[in-house]
Image: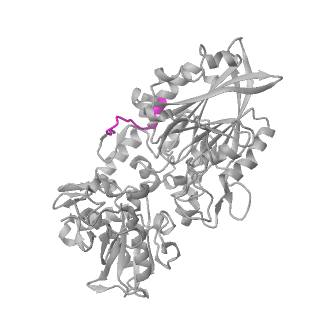
Amino acid sequence: MSADPGISRRGALGGLSAAGALALAGWPGTAAASSARDALITVMGTSDLHGHCLNWDYFKDAEFEDGEGNHIGIAKAASLIKEVRAERGRNNTLLFDSGDTIQGAPLATYYNVVEPITETGQTHPMARAMNAVGYDAVALGNHEFNYGLEHLDTWIDQMQAPVLAANALHHGTDEPAYRPYVLKRMKVDCLDKPGTQPLVVGVLGLTNPGSIIWDRHNVEGELEFADLVESARHWVPVMRGEGADLVIVSAHSGDSGTSSYGGGVPVENASAMVAEEVPGIDAILFGHAHRDISERFVTNKVTGEQVLMTMPSYWGRRLSVMDLALRRERGRWRVTSKSAVTLNSNTVEEDPEIVELVADQHATAVEYVNQVVATSVEELSAAQACWRDTAIVDYIQHVQIETVRAAIQDTAEAALPVLSIAAPFSRSAVFPAGDVSIRDIAGLYVYDNTLLAGVLTGAQLRDYLEYSARYFHQVSASGAVDPGGLTNAGGTPDYNFDQVAGLEYDIDVSRPVGGRITSLTLQGAKVADDQRFVLAVNNYRQSGGGGFPHITGAPVVYNAQVQVRQALIDYATATGTIDPADFHVVNWRLVREGTPVFD
């Protein structure tokens, strides 16, 4: 895979205001406009909204804010969309999304899990908001499969826009399980004469093949996920043959050509490969990687044409705006120029229509997450959880161990030691001293994972821990160590640093990857290679997420589909008190030649 030397990544500017950006992309009065003479269309896009309707942080019970001044939510994006539509003309604009829509914020979680739309018949807040904004098409992201196919089908039925995923196939067939594409038949306003001209824009939806790993228990035997390039290679000519003047791809896939998983599954981040290898594509709206890439050009190897690509960050922080200048020649449209910018949602107020539309559901979610479920005897923080064994992560471990141990007590595995893995999902997570609410627990365990348990041997556990220990940069055997520069080696995210509770081990960060677990014991006795353990894990890890060894093939001894977050809430409610003395054991540490790195 290669890209043009002349790549532009204006996303580095942090997004533009609508007023500052509308003249950049070839609108009337600019050079690009005069070269087109016939028409200009604007394609807007969002991605990775992750259940965020409003500019609200449910974990802090306050308006969202970060150190970069970003704002979030569909209500913010809706105001930008209205500005662009007013400037461009409704006839000349389209709006797409590239997936990961219904999972994420507690607002969405409430209607996915607490009062699921499959049981209540309520309209999902994301469907309610997106319908009001007026999307023209939406692609499926991998997180759309988190709650099972019945839940996904219910949400799709609620959506007024077509929901697309050309490469999600019925198991054992080549037949798409969801709509692969849609042709938008427009009457575009002409630039230099009155009246409109017909224009057909085809949009192809592509989803992430990793869902076969990450949501295996939801999709196995039901769906298969084909390669993005091969799927686009099949469907783009079909769309052109049915009259598409322009072809836009909405892909839930990054652009790097890499995957977070091993072989055997099509490439995870394949959007630039699609642009490079499949002729007939004019532009790609892409997501999944949570980056702000306002404009990138990739040269198609077959035609030599430039394919425009744009990624609008995530959570509604940005709105991608692609402008395509068109000339009509011998009854056909030709693209004469194209460009893109990303607009910053912090430049506008929330759209009051969207705010009012989801107000009741927002209030319900706020009330729910602020329920007090327990009292903590002291403040527990995850601020140092990426390099220390902390009590707040041990709380997750404790609940997982207790849940699994109780479930297997009458099984053949009852006599085996029960261990647990947990990762520091959020360094900002805190249980305050005193009242602990659902939002405090949700702030610690931010994903909608379910709990499983499998059987691993001592040798497999050592491999597992060695793989996890690649999270740390190698440091010298002496001298001070800065925690800030120690973690996330090779771009490994915090959620892929698994800590194991139930045995004791040292991680020697002065040693190279693969030889860092220098001590591995159970109650002081060295763990034998053939010793067997029950390991509590989440479904993401057990399905292969993160690529950890052995866990996907480990015999499963527990899978009651209990959500980990809900197990934490239920346990806190039942006990009423969170006391580290009941569960916190420092069982792992970072060392250099046997000496602890930190006191």
Q: Is residue 15 left or right of residue 598?
A: right
Residue 182 placed where, x, y %?
70, 40
Q: Is residue 448 shown in magenta?
A: no
Determine if residue 583 is in view. no
Return the residue found at the far top. 193
Q: Is residue 395 left or right of residue 421?
A: left
Camera-side residue of 333 and 119: 333
Residue 408 placed where, x, y %?
40, 81
Residue 428 placed where, x, y %?
29, 51
Q: Residue at x 68, y 63 (%)?
A: 171
Camera-side residue of 393 and 117: 393
Determine if residue 398 is in view. yes
Q: Total number of numbered labels?
A: 0
Q: Residue at x 35, y 74 (%)?
A: 517
Q: Residue at x 66, y 52 (%)?
A: 228
User: Where are the magenta residues, as a range?
Assistant: 64-78
Q: Quadrant of residue 455?
A: bottom left
Q: Is residue 71 shown in magenta?
A: yes
Mainly helix, strand or loop, the magenta region? loop
Residue 223 placed where, x, y %?
64, 61
Q: Quadrant of residue 403?
A: bottom left
Q: Quadrant of residue 45?
A: top right
Q: Is residue 524 left or right of residue 558?
A: left
